[in-house]
Image (cartoon, helix red, strand yellow):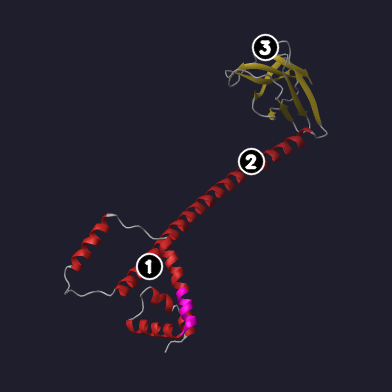
Amino acid sequence: MMDRNTIKNTGILEQYLLGELSEKESTDVENILKEDDELREYFSKMEDDMEQIALENAISPPTHLKTAIFNNIEKDTTHSDEKVIPLEKTKRKSYNFAIAASLATLFLLSSGWLYNQWKETEQTIVNLQQETDNLRTKLVNIEGDLKETNDWYRAINKPDVVQLVLKGNEKSPNSAAVAYVNHQNKEVILNPQGLSKLKNNNTYQMWADVEGEMIDMGVISSDVEMIKMKYIENAESLNITIEPAGGNDHPTVEQLISNVIL
């Protein structure tokens, strides 16, 4: 025999409300509800709550069903010898069906919402991963630039380094470059940032004068802060000319824009 606590704690009332119990179980529950005022009050509140949920989430049927239903009712009333279905039972089944349909609707809506939330979260994770990868790449580039800058700084600040300024002449009065010459390590580093911008079909080139002969030290890139040039033994001066793009095998003397004596 079921008691109050068993009914309240095992979900039997919910099953009874949804019409999921056998006929015998339903009868047992109804008998207990008749005798137990507290349990009946508890069930009444549960029934009201379920009804409220059903009403709030009810789905309106198509309007054409109304006419069909009334037509069936009229047909039923014309046959008095046909079996009459008790109103209370029909109401109970319809009510149970409405609750079940509403709960199913709530489940579907909740599932759809959870799915959308999951997809949004998944996309957010992808975006965050992409941003993390971009930041990691930028960090690697910054670290590389910092290391290169430190290497240049150490190279031009050694005790044996001689700093030479190559100022532009009348052909390029606004130009200037700084050469760092280390005869001990046989290195020449050039800072070309002060050179005036050239057209795409021209470039700067550096030369070392050795006993009147101009020897190529390399083409000067215009998009770098520092560049290592060739070290030439016994150079008497450093010279910069404007040459065709890609450089020249001999200097264009009339395009000499700067030189400095060593």
Q: CA distance from mark 1 to mark 2?
A: 61 Å
The residue where tag 3 is placed is 253
Query: Is 88 positioned to the left or the right of 134 in the image?
Result: left
Residue stretch in magenta: 36-44
Q: Does 25 sit above or below residue 242?
A: below
Dot 2 or dot 3: first in sequence order is 2
Q: Secondary structure at mark 3?
A: helix
Dot 1, crowdedness within 10 Å: few (<14), some or many (≥20)?
some
Left or right, 108 with respect to 185, comes to left
Question: What residue is at 27 percent from the left and 58 percent from the top?
Answer: 66
Q: Nearer the viewer, residue 129 or 201?
A: 129
Q: Quadrant of residue 262?
A: top right
Residue 261 or 212: which is nearer the viewer?
261
Count every numbered label the image shows and give the total.
3
Q: Which numbered disc, 3 or 1, marks the residue that appears first in the sequence? A: 1
Marks 3 and 1, how far apart at CA = 97 Å
Quadrant of the frame with the N terminus: bottom left
* Front residue of 229 and 91: 91
Asked whether 43 falls inside the magenta stretch, the response is yes
Residue 141 bears which disc, if any? 2
Q: Residues within 10 Å of mark 2 (few under 14, many from 20)?
A: few
